[in-house]
Image (cartoon, helix red, strand yellow):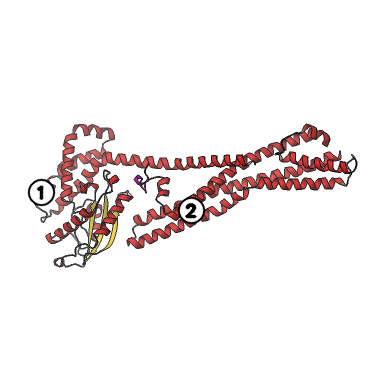
Protein backbone atom coordinates (compact mmCIF):
# COMPACT_ATOMS: atom_id res chain seq x y z
CA UNK A 1 0.00 0.00 0.00
CA UNK A 2 1.31 3.37 -0.89
CA UNK A 3 1.94 5.71 1.97
CA UNK A 4 -0.31 8.52 0.72
CA UNK A 5 -3.31 6.21 0.73
CA UNK A 6 -2.44 5.16 4.25
CA UNK A 7 -2.43 8.76 5.46
CA UNK A 8 -5.67 9.45 3.69
CA UNK A 9 -7.27 6.51 5.43
CA UNK A 10 -5.94 7.75 8.75
CA UNK A 11 -7.62 11.09 8.17
CA UNK A 12 -10.87 9.41 7.15
CA UNK A 13 -10.77 7.25 10.25
CA UNK A 14 -10.17 10.35 12.37
CA UNK A 15 -13.18 12.10 10.87
CA UNK A 16 -15.38 9.06 11.41
CA UNK A 17 -14.33 8.89 15.05
CA UNK A 18 -15.15 12.53 15.55
CA UNK A 19 -18.57 11.96 14.04
CA UNK A 20 -19.25 8.92 16.19
CA UNK A 21 -18.23 10.71 19.37
CA UNK A 22 -20.37 13.69 18.42
CA UNK A 23 -23.29 11.38 17.68
CA UNK A 24 -22.94 9.84 21.11
CA UNK A 25 -22.72 13.20 22.84
CA UNK A 26 -25.41 15.23 21.16
CA UNK A 27 -28.53 13.12 21.79
CA UNK A 28 -27.69 12.79 25.45
CA UNK A 29 -27.23 16.48 25.79
CA UNK A 30 -30.42 17.25 23.98
CA UNK A 31 -32.52 15.09 26.25
CA UNK A 32 -30.95 16.60 29.29
CA UNK A 33 -31.59 20.06 27.96
CA UNK A 34 -35.17 19.28 27.18
CA UNK A 35 -35.56 17.99 30.67
CA UNK A 36 -34.27 21.25 32.04
CA UNK A 37 -36.75 23.23 30.03
CA UNK A 38 -39.63 21.07 31.14
CA UNK A 39 -38.72 21.31 34.74
CA UNK A 40 -38.42 25.04 34.65
CA UNK A 41 -41.67 25.23 32.75
CA UNK A 42 -43.86 23.26 35.07
CA UNK A 43 -41.85 22.79 38.20
CA UNK A 44 -41.61 26.47 38.90
CA UNK A 45 -45.31 26.40 39.12
CA UNK A 46 -46.23 23.00 40.36
CA UNK A 47 -43.11 21.93 42.16
CA UNK A 48 -42.79 24.97 44.29
CA UNK A 49 -46.41 25.17 45.11
CA UNK A 50 -47.09 21.52 45.64
CA UNK A 51 -43.70 20.28 46.68
CA UNK A 52 -42.44 22.97 48.95
CA UNK A 53 -45.12 25.45 49.69
CA UNK A 54 -47.93 23.02 50.04
CA UNK A 55 -45.99 20.53 52.03
CA UNK A 56 -44.63 23.15 54.30
CA UNK A 57 -48.10 24.32 54.96
CA UNK A 58 -49.38 20.83 55.51
CA UNK A 59 -46.58 19.91 57.81
CA UNK A 60 -47.13 23.01 59.83
CA UNK A 61 -50.81 22.71 59.99
CA UNK A 62 -50.52 19.24 61.36
CA UNK A 63 -48.02 20.01 63.99
CA UNK A 64 -49.32 23.35 65.00
CA UNK A 65 -45.94 24.61 66.11
CA UNK A 66 -46.79 27.01 68.83
CA UNK A 67 -43.20 28.21 69.14
CA UNK A 68 -42.97 29.48 65.64
CA UNK A 69 -42.26 33.15 65.27
CA UNK A 70 -45.57 34.89 65.26
CA UNK A 71 -45.47 36.56 61.83
CA UNK A 72 -44.37 33.47 60.00
CA UNK A 73 -46.63 30.84 61.44
CA UNK A 74 -50.01 32.42 60.78
CA UNK A 75 -49.00 33.45 57.32
CA UNK A 76 -48.08 29.87 56.56
CA UNK A 77 -51.16 28.43 58.12
CA UNK A 78 -53.32 30.54 55.88
CA UNK A 79 -51.42 29.78 52.77
CA UNK A 80 -51.95 26.11 52.10
CA UNK A 81 -55.54 26.12 50.97
CA UNK A 82 -55.23 28.53 48.04
CA UNK A 83 -51.84 27.23 47.07
CA UNK A 84 -52.56 23.56 47.06
CA UNK A 85 -55.58 23.78 44.90
CA UNK A 86 -54.05 25.06 41.69
CA UNK A 87 -51.06 22.89 42.26
CA UNK A 88 -53.04 19.70 42.27
CA UNK A 89 -55.00 20.64 39.22
CA UNK A 90 -51.93 21.62 37.34
CA UNK A 91 -50.36 18.26 37.84
CA UNK A 92 -53.08 16.46 35.98
CA UNK A 93 -53.41 19.06 33.27
CA UNK A 94 -51.77 18.70 29.92
CA UNK A 95 -49.23 21.19 28.71
CA UNK A 96 -51.73 23.09 26.64
CA UNK A 97 -54.15 23.41 29.43
CA UNK A 98 -51.47 24.54 31.76
CA UNK A 99 -50.54 27.21 29.28
CA UNK A 100 -54.12 28.31 28.95
CA UNK A 101 -54.60 28.36 32.63
CA UNK A 102 -51.40 30.21 33.04
CA UNK A 103 -52.82 33.02 31.00
CA UNK A 104 -56.02 33.34 32.91
CA UNK A 105 -54.56 33.08 36.34
CA UNK A 106 -51.21 34.46 35.50
CA UNK A 107 -51.45 37.43 37.74
CA UNK A 108 -52.92 35.50 40.56
CA UNK A 109 -50.28 32.85 40.38
CA UNK A 110 -47.39 35.23 40.10
CA UNK A 111 -48.65 37.01 43.16
CA UNK A 112 -48.90 33.74 44.99
CA UNK A 113 -45.46 32.76 43.90
CA UNK A 114 -44.03 35.98 45.15
CA UNK A 115 -45.59 35.44 48.50
CA UNK A 116 -44.31 31.92 48.65
CA UNK A 117 -40.85 33.12 47.93
CA UNK A 118 -41.09 35.64 50.68
CA UNK A 119 -42.22 32.98 53.04
CA UNK A 120 -39.43 30.73 52.01
CA UNK A 121 -36.87 33.37 52.61
CA UNK A 122 -38.20 33.86 56.08
CA UNK A 123 -38.45 30.21 56.83
CA UNK A 124 -35.35 28.96 55.19
CA UNK A 125 -33.66 27.88 58.35
CA UNK A 126 -34.85 24.61 56.95
CA UNK A 127 -35.37 21.24 58.12
CA UNK A 128 -33.97 20.08 61.37
CA UNK A 129 -34.49 16.43 61.74
CA UNK A 130 -33.01 13.48 63.47
CA UNK A 131 -32.36 10.26 61.67
CA UNK A 132 -35.48 8.76 63.09
CA UNK A 133 -37.68 11.56 62.01
CA UNK A 134 -36.16 11.59 58.62
CA UNK A 135 -36.87 7.92 58.25
CA UNK A 136 -40.36 8.15 59.60
CA UNK A 137 -41.33 11.39 57.97
CA UNK A 138 -39.66 10.35 54.76
CA UNK A 139 -39.71 12.91 52.06
CA UNK A 140 -42.32 15.07 53.61
CA UNK A 141 -40.11 15.65 56.60
CA UNK A 142 -36.93 16.67 54.89
CA UNK A 143 -37.98 17.63 51.42
CA UNK A 144 -40.60 20.01 52.56
CA UNK A 145 -38.37 21.66 55.05
CA UNK A 146 -41.00 21.06 57.65
CA UNK A 147 -39.62 21.78 61.03
CA UNK A 148 -38.78 18.34 62.21
CA UNK A 149 -36.98 17.66 65.38
CA UNK A 150 -33.41 17.69 66.41
CA UNK A 151 -31.76 15.04 68.53
CA UNK A 152 -32.20 11.94 66.51
CA UNK A 153 -32.29 9.65 69.48
CA UNK A 154 -34.98 11.60 71.20
CA UNK A 155 -36.81 11.84 67.93
CA UNK A 156 -40.53 11.62 68.07
CA UNK A 157 -42.89 14.43 67.34
CA UNK A 158 -41.80 17.03 69.82
CA UNK A 159 -41.83 20.59 68.58
CA UNK A 160 -38.71 22.71 68.63
CA UNK A 161 -37.88 24.65 71.70
CA UNK A 162 -36.90 28.28 71.17
CA UNK A 163 -33.27 27.77 72.15
CA UNK A 164 -32.76 25.08 69.52
CA UNK A 165 -34.54 27.16 66.98
CA UNK A 166 -32.37 30.13 67.64
CA UNK A 167 -29.25 28.04 67.42
CA UNK A 168 -30.33 26.55 64.11
CA UNK A 169 -31.21 29.94 62.71
CA UNK A 170 -27.78 31.20 63.74
CA UNK A 171 -26.12 28.35 61.92
CA UNK A 172 -28.21 28.87 58.83
CA UNK A 173 -27.37 32.55 58.82
CA UNK A 174 -23.71 31.74 59.04
CA UNK A 175 -23.88 29.22 56.22
CA UNK A 176 -25.96 31.51 54.09
CA UNK A 177 -23.65 34.46 54.49
CA UNK A 178 -20.67 32.37 53.48
CA UNK A 179 -22.39 30.82 50.50
CA UNK A 180 -21.94 32.21 47.02
CA UNK A 181 -23.98 30.57 44.30
CA UNK A 182 -21.89 29.91 41.23
CA UNK A 183 -22.89 32.45 38.63
CA UNK A 184 -24.11 30.17 35.90
CA UNK A 185 -26.31 28.11 38.16
CA UNK A 186 -27.99 31.06 39.69
CA UNK A 187 -31.06 31.08 37.53
CA UNK A 188 -31.70 27.38 37.45
CA UNK A 189 -34.24 25.63 39.51
CA UNK A 190 -31.93 23.71 41.76
CA UNK A 191 -32.42 22.15 45.11
CA UNK A 192 -29.87 20.37 47.23
CA UNK A 193 -30.58 18.88 50.60
CA UNK A 194 -27.65 18.29 52.88
CA UNK A 195 -27.68 16.63 56.27
CA UNK A 196 -24.84 17.57 58.59
CA UNK A 197 -23.98 16.20 61.96
CA UNK A 198 -22.54 18.63 64.48
CA UNK A 199 -20.54 17.70 67.51
CA UNK A 200 -20.96 19.44 70.82
CA UNK A 201 -18.08 21.83 70.14
CA UNK A 202 -19.62 22.87 66.84
CA UNK A 203 -17.41 20.75 64.59
CA UNK A 204 -19.10 19.20 61.58
CA UNK A 205 -18.38 15.49 61.78
CA UNK A 206 -20.45 14.31 58.87
CA UNK A 207 -21.79 15.87 55.69
CA UNK A 208 -24.30 13.82 53.82
CA UNK A 209 -25.98 14.87 50.64
CA UNK A 210 -29.53 13.69 50.87
CA UNK A 211 -30.62 15.04 47.54
CA UNK A 212 -28.37 16.22 44.77
CA UNK A 213 -29.48 19.07 42.58
CA UNK A 214 -28.02 17.28 39.58
CA UNK A 215 -25.66 20.14 38.98
CA UNK A 216 -22.21 19.26 40.15
CA UNK A 217 -20.88 22.80 40.40
CA UNK A 218 -23.82 23.80 42.51
CA UNK A 219 -23.39 20.82 44.84
CA UNK A 220 -19.68 21.45 45.09
CA UNK A 221 -20.27 25.05 46.10
CA UNK A 222 -22.45 23.85 48.94
CA UNK A 223 -19.96 21.29 50.17
CA UNK A 224 -17.26 23.92 50.00
CA UNK A 225 -19.30 26.34 52.03
CA UNK A 226 -20.01 23.72 54.66
CA UNK A 227 -16.34 22.94 54.93
CA UNK A 228 -15.56 26.64 55.12
CA UNK A 229 -17.93 27.37 57.99
CA UNK A 230 -16.59 24.48 60.04
CA UNK A 231 -16.41 24.79 63.03
CA UNK A 232 -19.85 26.16 63.69
CA UNK A 233 -20.74 27.78 66.97
CA UNK A 234 -20.82 25.14 69.71
CA UNK A 235 -24.13 23.66 70.69
CA UNK A 236 -25.45 25.61 73.65
CA UNK A 237 -25.08 23.76 76.92
CA UNK A 238 -28.73 24.37 77.65
CA UNK A 239 -29.69 21.99 74.87
CA UNK A 240 -28.00 19.20 76.72
CA UNK A 241 -26.98 17.09 73.76
CA UNK A 242 -23.74 15.66 72.44
CA UNK A 243 -24.46 15.90 68.76
CA UNK A 244 -27.08 17.21 66.44
CA UNK A 245 -28.24 16.44 62.95
CA UNK A 246 -29.37 19.32 60.85
CA UNK A 247 -30.83 19.25 57.38
CA UNK A 248 -30.38 22.20 55.08
CA UNK A 249 -32.09 22.82 51.83
CA UNK A 250 -30.17 25.03 49.47
CA UNK A 251 -32.06 26.91 46.79
CA UNK A 252 -30.40 29.42 44.48
CA UNK A 253 -33.05 31.93 45.45
CA UNK A 254 -31.78 32.02 49.02
CA UNK A 255 -29.21 34.59 48.13
CA UNK A 256 -31.33 37.12 46.36
CA UNK B 1 -19.49 25.86 24.12
CA UNK B 2 -18.11 26.25 27.56
CA UNK B 3 -17.41 22.95 29.20
CA UNK B 4 -18.07 24.16 32.68
CA UNK B 5 -21.70 24.77 31.90
CA UNK B 6 -22.24 21.12 31.09
CA UNK B 7 -23.86 19.03 33.69
CA UNK B 8 -21.55 16.23 34.64
CA UNK B 9 -24.18 13.60 35.32
CA UNK B 10 -26.94 14.22 32.86
CA UNK B 11 -24.64 15.34 30.07
CA UNK B 12 -23.48 13.05 27.33
CA UNK B 13 -20.38 11.09 26.67
CA UNK B 14 -18.37 14.19 26.10
CA UNK B 15 -19.01 15.78 29.47
CA UNK B 16 -18.44 12.46 31.16
CA UNK B 17 -15.01 12.31 29.58
CA UNK B 18 -14.37 15.93 30.36
CA UNK B 19 -15.12 15.50 34.03
CA UNK B 20 -12.92 12.42 34.37
CA UNK B 21 -9.55 12.61 36.07
CA UNK B 22 -6.22 13.16 34.28
CA UNK B 23 -5.24 9.50 34.27
CA UNK B 24 -8.60 8.48 32.84
CA UNK B 25 -8.25 11.22 30.22
CA UNK B 26 -4.80 10.00 29.24
CA UNK B 27 -6.10 6.44 29.01
CA UNK B 28 -8.97 7.53 26.84
CA UNK B 29 -6.67 9.51 24.60
CA UNK B 30 -4.48 6.46 24.08
CA UNK B 31 -7.52 4.35 23.35
CA UNK B 32 -8.81 6.91 20.90
CA UNK B 33 -5.52 6.86 19.03
CA UNK B 34 -5.54 3.07 19.02
CA UNK B 35 -9.05 3.08 17.68
CA UNK B 36 -8.34 5.65 14.98
CA UNK B 37 -5.23 3.84 13.76
CA UNK B 38 -6.88 0.44 13.81
CA UNK B 39 -9.85 1.70 11.82
CA UNK B 40 -7.50 3.30 9.31
CA UNK B 41 -5.73 -0.07 8.97
CA UNK B 42 -9.07 -1.75 8.44
CA UNK B 43 -9.93 0.60 5.61
CA UNK B 44 -6.50 0.24 4.03
CA UNK B 45 -6.53 -3.55 4.29
CA UNK B 46 -10.07 -3.80 3.02
CA UNK B 47 -9.14 -1.98 -0.15
CA UNK B 48 -5.78 -3.68 -0.52
CA UNK B 49 -7.14 -7.20 -0.15
CA UNK B 50 -10.09 -6.48 -2.37
CA UNK B 51 -7.76 -5.27 -5.08
CA UNK B 52 -5.40 -8.21 -4.71
CA UNK B 53 -8.30 -10.66 -4.95
CA UNK B 54 -9.56 -8.97 -8.11
CA UNK B 55 -6.05 -9.16 -9.54
CA UNK B 56 -5.96 -12.90 -8.75
CA UNK B 57 -9.20 -13.46 -10.61
CA UNK B 58 -7.88 -11.55 -13.61
CA UNK B 59 -4.67 -13.57 -13.53
CA UNK B 60 -6.49 -16.91 -13.54
CA UNK B 61 -8.77 -15.80 -16.34
CA UNK B 62 -5.74 -14.81 -18.43
CA UNK B 63 -3.86 -17.99 -17.49
CA UNK B 64 -6.78 -20.14 -18.62
CA UNK B 65 -6.88 -18.34 -21.96
CA UNK B 66 -3.14 -18.57 -22.55
CA UNK B 67 -1.76 -21.95 -23.58
CA UNK B 68 1.89 -21.04 -22.95
CA UNK B 69 3.93 -18.81 -20.70
CA UNK B 70 4.98 -16.57 -23.57
CA UNK B 71 1.40 -15.96 -24.56
CA UNK B 72 0.46 -15.23 -20.97
CA UNK B 73 3.16 -12.56 -20.78
CA UNK B 74 1.87 -10.93 -23.92
CA UNK B 75 -1.80 -10.86 -22.93
CA UNK B 76 -1.39 -10.15 -19.23
CA UNK B 77 -0.03 -6.72 -18.39
CA UNK B 78 -0.47 -4.92 -15.14
CA UNK B 79 1.22 -2.51 -12.76
CA UNK B 80 4.16 -3.77 -10.75
CA UNK B 81 2.05 -3.09 -7.62
CA UNK B 82 0.03 -6.17 -8.49
CA UNK B 83 1.06 -9.21 -6.43
CA UNK B 84 0.18 -11.74 -9.11
CA UNK B 85 1.96 -9.76 -11.78
CA UNK B 86 5.04 -9.70 -9.59
CA UNK B 87 4.88 -13.47 -9.52
CA UNK B 88 5.00 -13.57 -13.30
CA UNK B 89 7.80 -11.01 -13.38
CA UNK B 90 9.91 -13.08 -10.98
CA UNK B 91 9.29 -16.12 -13.10
CA UNK B 92 10.15 -14.25 -16.30
CA UNK B 93 13.36 -12.78 -14.86
CA UNK B 94 14.56 -16.22 -13.81
CA UNK B 95 13.82 -17.70 -17.21
CA UNK B 96 15.58 -14.92 -19.14
CA UNK B 97 18.61 -15.23 -16.86
CA UNK B 98 18.83 -18.97 -17.61
CA UNK B 99 18.33 -18.36 -21.31
CA UNK B 100 21.17 -15.86 -21.41
CA UNK B 101 23.49 -18.26 -19.61
CA UNK B 102 22.63 -21.42 -21.52
CA UNK B 103 20.35 -21.89 -24.47
CA UNK B 104 16.85 -20.84 -25.40
CA UNK B 105 15.33 -24.09 -24.16
CA UNK B 106 14.10 -24.45 -20.63
CA UNK B 107 15.70 -27.46 -19.09
CA UNK B 108 14.02 -29.59 -16.39
CA UNK B 109 16.63 -28.67 -13.78
CA UNK B 110 15.80 -24.96 -14.07
CA UNK B 111 12.22 -25.65 -12.92
CA UNK B 112 13.08 -25.90 -9.17
CA UNK B 113 15.04 -22.66 -9.42
CA UNK B 114 12.03 -20.89 -10.90
CA UNK B 115 9.86 -22.48 -8.23
CA UNK B 116 12.10 -21.14 -5.50
CA UNK B 117 12.09 -17.67 -7.02
CA UNK B 118 8.31 -17.70 -6.99
CA UNK B 119 8.22 -18.98 -3.40
CA UNK B 120 10.36 -16.04 -2.37
CA UNK B 121 8.01 -13.67 -4.17
CA UNK B 122 4.98 -15.22 -2.48
CA UNK B 123 6.57 -14.89 0.92
CA UNK B 124 7.52 -11.27 0.22
CA UNK B 125 4.03 -10.49 -0.99
CA UNK B 126 2.38 -12.10 2.01
CA UNK B 127 4.67 -10.10 4.31
CA UNK B 128 3.68 -6.94 2.48
CA UNK B 129 -0.02 -7.78 2.73
CA UNK B 130 0.38 -8.67 6.38
CA UNK B 131 1.99 -5.36 7.26
CA UNK B 132 0.18 -3.37 9.99
CA UNK B 133 -2.22 -6.24 10.51
CA UNK B 134 -0.40 -7.02 13.75
CA UNK B 135 -1.43 -3.61 15.04
CA UNK B 136 -5.03 -4.81 14.94
CA UNK B 137 -4.06 -7.76 17.10
CA UNK B 138 -2.23 -5.45 19.48
CA UNK B 139 -5.29 -3.20 19.74
CA UNK B 140 -7.54 -6.19 20.27
CA UNK B 141 -5.40 -7.52 23.08
CA UNK B 142 -4.12 -4.40 24.79
CA UNK B 143 -6.94 -1.87 24.70
CA UNK B 144 -9.28 -3.69 27.13
CA UNK B 145 -6.42 -3.78 29.60
CA UNK B 146 -5.60 -0.14 29.07
CA UNK B 147 -9.26 0.69 29.63
CA UNK B 148 -9.32 -1.48 32.71
CA UNK B 149 -6.34 0.37 34.06
CA UNK B 150 -8.21 3.65 33.68
CA UNK B 151 -11.22 2.17 35.45
CA UNK B 152 -9.21 0.79 38.34
CA UNK B 153 -7.52 4.12 38.75
CA UNK B 154 -10.84 5.96 38.69
CA UNK B 155 -12.36 3.64 41.26
CA UNK B 156 -9.33 4.09 43.48
CA UNK B 157 -9.91 7.82 43.23
CA UNK B 158 -13.55 7.55 44.04
CA UNK B 159 -12.86 5.40 47.08
CA UNK B 160 -10.39 7.97 48.28
CA UNK B 161 -13.13 10.52 47.78
CA UNK B 162 -15.33 8.52 50.13
CA UNK B 163 -12.57 8.66 52.68
CA UNK B 164 -12.11 12.37 52.29
CA UNK B 165 -15.76 13.27 52.42
CA UNK B 166 -16.55 10.74 55.08
CA UNK B 167 -19.77 9.70 53.42
CA UNK B 168 -20.60 6.44 51.79
CA UNK B 169 -23.77 7.53 50.07
CA UNK B 170 -24.24 6.21 46.59
CA UNK B 171 -24.52 9.76 45.31
CA UNK B 172 -20.89 10.36 46.24
CA UNK B 173 -19.53 7.06 44.93
CA UNK B 174 -21.59 6.52 41.82
CA UNK B 175 -20.36 9.45 39.67
CA UNK B 176 -16.74 8.47 40.21
CA UNK B 177 -17.43 4.89 39.26
CA UNK B 178 -19.43 5.85 36.21
CA UNK B 179 -16.59 8.12 35.13
CA UNK B 180 -14.19 5.28 35.69
CA UNK B 181 -16.21 2.73 33.80
CA UNK B 182 -16.23 4.79 30.64
CA UNK B 183 -12.54 3.92 30.22
CA UNK B 184 -13.37 0.22 30.07
CA UNK B 185 -16.23 0.93 27.71
CA UNK B 186 -13.90 2.76 25.38
CA UNK B 187 -11.32 0.02 25.63
CA UNK B 188 -13.91 -2.52 24.57
CA UNK B 189 -15.20 -0.23 21.85
CA UNK B 190 -11.68 -0.10 20.41
CA UNK B 191 -10.98 -3.81 20.91
CA UNK B 192 -14.12 -5.46 19.55
CA UNK B 193 -13.88 -4.13 15.97
CA UNK B 194 -10.15 -4.83 16.03
CA UNK B 195 -10.68 -8.48 17.01
CA UNK B 196 -13.34 -8.98 14.37
CA UNK B 197 -11.28 -7.24 11.72
CA UNK B 198 -8.12 -9.13 12.60
CA UNK B 199 -9.83 -12.49 12.27
CA UNK B 200 -11.56 -11.46 9.08
CA UNK B 201 -8.43 -10.10 7.45
CA UNK B 202 -6.16 -12.94 8.49
CA UNK B 203 -8.66 -15.37 6.97
CA UNK B 204 -8.70 -13.35 3.80
CA UNK B 205 -4.92 -13.12 3.74
CA UNK B 206 -4.67 -16.90 4.03
CA UNK B 207 -6.96 -17.29 1.04
CA UNK B 208 -4.93 -14.81 -0.99
CA UNK B 209 -1.67 -16.56 -0.20
CA UNK B 210 -3.10 -19.93 -1.15
CA UNK B 211 -4.31 -18.45 -4.41
CA UNK B 212 -0.84 -17.14 -5.10
CA UNK B 213 0.59 -20.60 -4.46
CA UNK B 214 -1.91 -22.03 -6.89
CA UNK B 215 -0.91 -19.36 -9.38
CA UNK B 216 2.76 -20.30 -9.05
CA UNK B 217 1.93 -23.95 -9.77
CA UNK B 218 -0.14 -22.85 -12.71
CA UNK B 219 2.83 -20.88 -14.04
CA UNK B 220 5.15 -23.88 -13.68
CA UNK B 221 2.68 -25.89 -15.71
CA UNK B 222 2.57 -23.21 -18.38
CA UNK B 223 6.37 -23.05 -18.56
CA UNK B 224 6.55 -26.80 -19.01
CA UNK B 225 4.25 -26.61 -22.02
Residue A93 lies in quadrant: top left
* Front in this rendered view, residue B57 or B93: B93
Q: Which residue is drawn at 20% across and 63% down?
A: A151
The reply, left or right, for residue B39 in relation to residue A89 is right
* Front in this rendered view, residue A188 or A4: A4
Q: How many marks?
A: 2
Q: Mark 1 lies on which chain?
A: A
Position above or below: B65 against A144: above
On the image, numbered disc 2 is attached to which residue? B27
* Image quadrant where one finds the C terminus of chain B: top right
Position above or below: B146 against B193: below
* Residue A176 position within the rendered picture, expressed as x and y whole percent measured from the top left: 21, 53
* Front in this rendered view, residue A1 or B112: A1
Is residue B45 located in the magenta-colored stretch of the structure?
no
Q: What element carries label 2?
A: helix
In magenta, the rendered stretch is: B1-12
Residue B215 lies in quadrant: top right
* Residue A249 position within the rendered picture, expressed as x and y whole percent measured from the top left: 23, 52
Principal SS element in the magenta part? loop
Q: Which residue is drawn at 25% across and 54% down?
A: A138
* Residue B181 position within the rendered picture, expressed as x and y whole percent measured from the top left: 44, 53
Local crowd size for mark 1, using a 10 Å CA cut-off: few (<14), some (14–19), many (≥20): few
* Residue A155 position within the rendered picture, expressed as x and y whole percent measured from the top left: 20, 62
On the image, numbered disc 1 is attached to which residue? A74
**Which residue extends farthest left?**
A70
The reply, left or right, for residue B153 in relation to residue B211 is left
Q: Which mark is residue A48?
A: none
Do discs 2 and 1 belong to a common subunit? no
Q: Which chain carries label 2?
A: B
Amino acid sequence: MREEAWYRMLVISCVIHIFVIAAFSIPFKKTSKRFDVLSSYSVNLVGQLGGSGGAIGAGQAEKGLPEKPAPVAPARAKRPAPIKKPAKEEVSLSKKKVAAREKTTKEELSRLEERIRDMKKKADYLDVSGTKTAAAGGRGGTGAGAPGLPFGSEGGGKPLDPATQKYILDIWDKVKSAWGVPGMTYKKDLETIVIIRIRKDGRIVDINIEKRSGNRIYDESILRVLRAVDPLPPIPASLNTDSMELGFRFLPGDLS
Amino acid sequence: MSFSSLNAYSGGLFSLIYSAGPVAKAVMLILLIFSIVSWAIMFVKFRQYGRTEREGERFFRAAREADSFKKLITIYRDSPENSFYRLILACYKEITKRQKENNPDIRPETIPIIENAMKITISEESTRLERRLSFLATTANASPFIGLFGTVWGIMDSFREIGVRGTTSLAVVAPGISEALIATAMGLAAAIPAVLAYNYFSGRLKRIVSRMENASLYLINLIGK
